[in-house]
Image: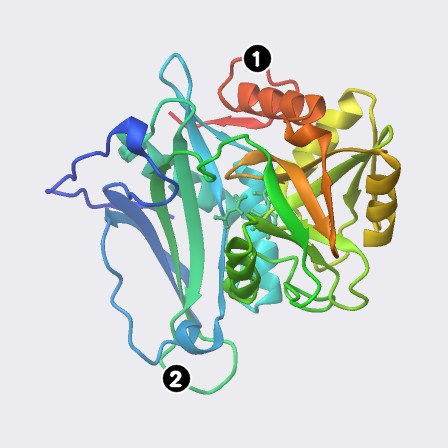
Amino acid sequence: MDIQVTLTTTPKQKPAQDKLKFGHNFTDHMFLMNYEAGKGWHNPRIVPYGPIPMDPSSSCFHYAQEIFEGMKAYRTADGKIQFFRPEENFKRLNSSCERLVIPKLDEALLLEGLKKLVEIDKDWVPDAPASLYIRPFVIANQEVLGVHPSVNYLYCVILSPSGAYYASGLAPVKIYVETRYVRASKGGMGACKTGGNYAASLIAQEEAERQGYSQVLWLDGVERKYVEEVGAMNVFFKIGDEIVTPELDGSILPGITRKSVIQLLKSWNMNVTERKLSVEELETAAKNGTLKEAFGTGTAAVISPIGELKVGDTVTVINNNEIGELSQKLYNTLTDIQWSRIPDPFGWITPCC
Ligand code: PLP
Ligand code: COI
């Protein structure tokens, strides 16, 4: 399929590199493609960034039939632009589509479109440690109020030159175990990147911030016994010599950083396991001193060390509230690969331009 390009005639002023926040600025162009029953996905195009006309009856506004992705483009020291495992994001986009009954997209075309879009806006890709956050999404836009899968969709990609997700950078964060609210439940949509999961999480996030915490540790929605994710990240704990991350059971988002961390740990011959981890086990490890490190993983923050964990009324300080050796090593290795400061033995880097 040919990708039509319409360039802007009014390019915007780029923000100062040292003032970049996460997701506040957007580049000059965006990618669009439509779906219509009978016609399939068609009209892939790059157009000037701007508002999307939407009818107020569009189904995504009412029944949240929408999905999204999040990945980054990096500018290397020699000025080249590259992606980190974008094929994984497009694969996950299609698996989210499947769960929300959205027609699947051609992953090769999505990658081609992304490369073309980023190439057009390549001057917007900041230098390290900032990067270009990429947000592809699909919204249902049939103009009807009945509850059923839409017959029309819009695929869109926007680009945001971004600094650190957490103002504190790699500094350890304080989290508590959330026992009242649930993010996702087995059989639900937890394994998908869809807005509803994030809407469900906001109240807990707000309460955590009110109490002086930055994130919550989500438990499973059925027994409220097993650890699932931390905020909008996957979570790892180093207990003794074992590095544990909750197994993917349908309610956890299969993070690409999580997958990369597991691959890295295995390549270092470390003992990494994907299994059920109960809060009780975590509490015991915290009490007997075997809880050595804890960290979240995600595209935005890469590695986010956990310095303080509150379980019930007990507050445990992890690794003296300092960045653990393992968290630091994982952060350094992942970001060094992302910016090609070290070789990439895993084939994780996809060149753009
Ligand atoms: N879990 C949730 C709920 C997320 O939103 C994210 C972020 O994208 C992750 C985990 C981490 O996924 P990834 O490493 O692919 O960014
Ligand atoms: C992540 O990339 O780690 C995220 O959680 C992205 C967030 C903005 C949804």
Q: Amino acid at mark 2?
A: Val
Query: Disc 2 beta carbon < 8 A from ligand 2?
Result: no
Which residue appears at 50% of the width and 84% of the height? 147
Residue in front for this viewpoint, 51 or 276:
276
Q: Is residue 274 visible?
A: yes
Q: How is the image coloured?
A: rainbow
Q: Earlier in the sequence, mark 1 or mark 2?
A: 2
| Displayed quadrant of residue 133 | top left
As drawn, is 287 to the left or to the right of 138?
A: right
Which residue appears at 72% of the width and 35% of the height? 318
Secondary element type, mark 1: loop
As drawn, is 177 to the left or to the right of 13?
A: right
Can you identify the residue that label 1 sits on?
Answer: 342
Q: Is residue 346 visible?
A: no
Tag shown at residue 144: 2
Secondary element type, mark 2: loop
Q: Is residue 185 above or below residue 240?
A: below
Residue in front for this viewpoint, 299 or 325:
325
Question: Which label sits in the foreground, 1 or 2?
Answer: 1
